[in-house]
Image: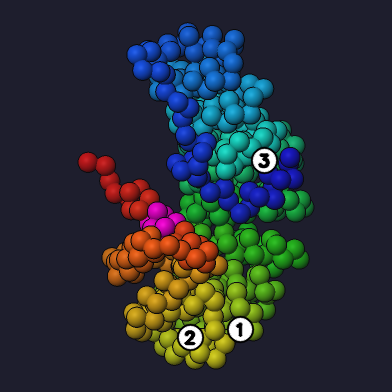
Amino acid sequence: MLAAILALSLWGFADTTTVAGAEESPSPAPAGQARPSLEECRRMLTEGDEASKLQAVAALKSLGQDAVPVLLTALGDPRDTVRTRAIVAVGKLAPAHADVAVPKLLELAQKDGAQVDDLPNWILAFQAIGKFGAQALPILDAEWTNASPEKKAVLCVAYSELGSAAAPAVPKLIELIQEDNVVNRRQAVGALMAIGPAAAPAVPVLRKALYHEDFHTQYWACRALGAIGEPALPAVPDLVDRLKNGAASVKRNAAAALGKIGPKIGPDAVQALTEAVDDVVQPVREQAVLALGRLGPDVAGPAREAIEKSHARRPIYPASAACWAIWRLGGSFEPLKNSLISDIRGGIYREEATEILLTMGRDAEPVIQELEALARALGAKKLEPLEEEELANIQQTLAELRAARQSATPCP
């Protein structure tokens, strides 16, 4: 169980609870039947069958923060489904009763491998801890005191879920990086990455980590520096060195980090990225191209010709990445539109193309309109199997774009 936590956590847990089955509530009480009271829910969780317990969990979630102590009892239920729904419900009611909820969720995160919907319960438990934000921090800090190395690795995952709210934990994460424990070092670096710009005090130790003998530590240090952004400018010479001399996975992450640190990286770094556009390793070329696109025409405009030549000679995948960078640096929009639609329809690079669309703001409208027209046209005919896949890919991208717009729209 611990091995799974530590292996997967470095890639981050996508919070899908707004769309995943775990967020779906059981059927409401039958028409004409009142919602159970707090005491009735307590009894149903103790004596009821699975359906009654699920109804109780749904009712408790709607009763608000006073229901949390009763809801927490469902975290120990023998039925996987009941625990799943209870974990999500506790997260929804955060930060209520953090002092008792967070320790129980942390305990569950270390041992509950059951999976009812899209994600296993241990990931849902970590995500629920993240919902408590700063309220969870003193509880995790108390757990850290006298914790075993294994427990500290787990706590790093919890800090990661808190994101920037875990900034006060940066000093202890810095200490952990310097210990001779490869697993904890990687977990600590992953937590710093999740904290983002507030992890700036860790830049010196992350610069050292770029040269660690463990190349996994090197590329996670690159990722953390990129997440810190502009405050990581002192690390630019080191990232340039890693881009030129690191292993392939280190080079691609160094390129990505330079692009995320931003336009103040200086001409030497821009030149190194421009040279990396022609790297023999495809993922390095891709990340160098994306980094130059992020830097924009004022800083990286002259690199456009190098990208165009490299892409023509040895195509960069996804094609939409190269076309986006060329467009960002002053090139034509039409090839970008065509490549985005092609990558989304094809499916292999759908996620990457969708991510590019999400960065484009209003400039993405012509692409979105064409995708919507394609979806309507495909939906109006009898489809071949390949066309069914294309339609599903387009619909998935459009759904993700709608969800992103809704989350970005402030409530009235």
In whole angstroms, how far apart are the C-alphas of marks 1 and 2? 11 Å
Q: What amino acid is found at the position of numbered circle 1 in the picture?
A: Asp
Q: Residue at x 43, y 79 (%)?
A: 323
Q: Is residue 241 left or right of residue 288?
A: right
- Which numbered mark, 1 or 3, is in the foreground of this view? 1
| Secondary structure beneath label 3 | helix
Residue 282 in picture, x, y percent from top left: 61, 78
Instruction: Say which mark, if any, is on residue 139.
Output: none
Residue 393, position in %: x, y? 47, 61
Q: Is residue 99 visible?
A: no
Label 3 crowd bin: few (<14), some (14–19), many (20+), radius 10 Å? many
The amino acid sitting under disc 2 is Ile
Q: Label 2 neighbourhood size at 10 Å, few (<14), some (14-19), many (20+)?
A: many
Of helix, strand and loop, which one carries label 1? loop
Pick the front one: 176 or 65? 65
Residue at horizontal 54%, vertical 26%?
A: 86
Identify whether 187 is placed above or below 314: above
| Disc nearer the start of the sequence (3/2) | 3
Bounds of the magenta segment: 394-401
Q: Amino acid at mark 3?
A: Val
Label annotation for residue 154? 3
Q: Are marks 3 and 2 in contact (CB under 8 Å)?
A: no
Magenta span main SS: helix
Separation of disc 3 and disc 2 at Cα?
Answer: 42 Å
**Is residue 208 depicted above or below 285 in this figure?**
above
Q: Quadrant of the N terminus?
A: top right
Is 184 placed left or right of 251 in the picture? right
Q: Mark 1 — residue?
A: 279
Label 2, on which residue? 307
Q: Is residue 223 visible to the viewer in this orientation of the structure?
A: yes
Q: Secondary structure at mark 2?
A: helix
> Going 22% across and 41% down the picture, which residue do you hit?
412
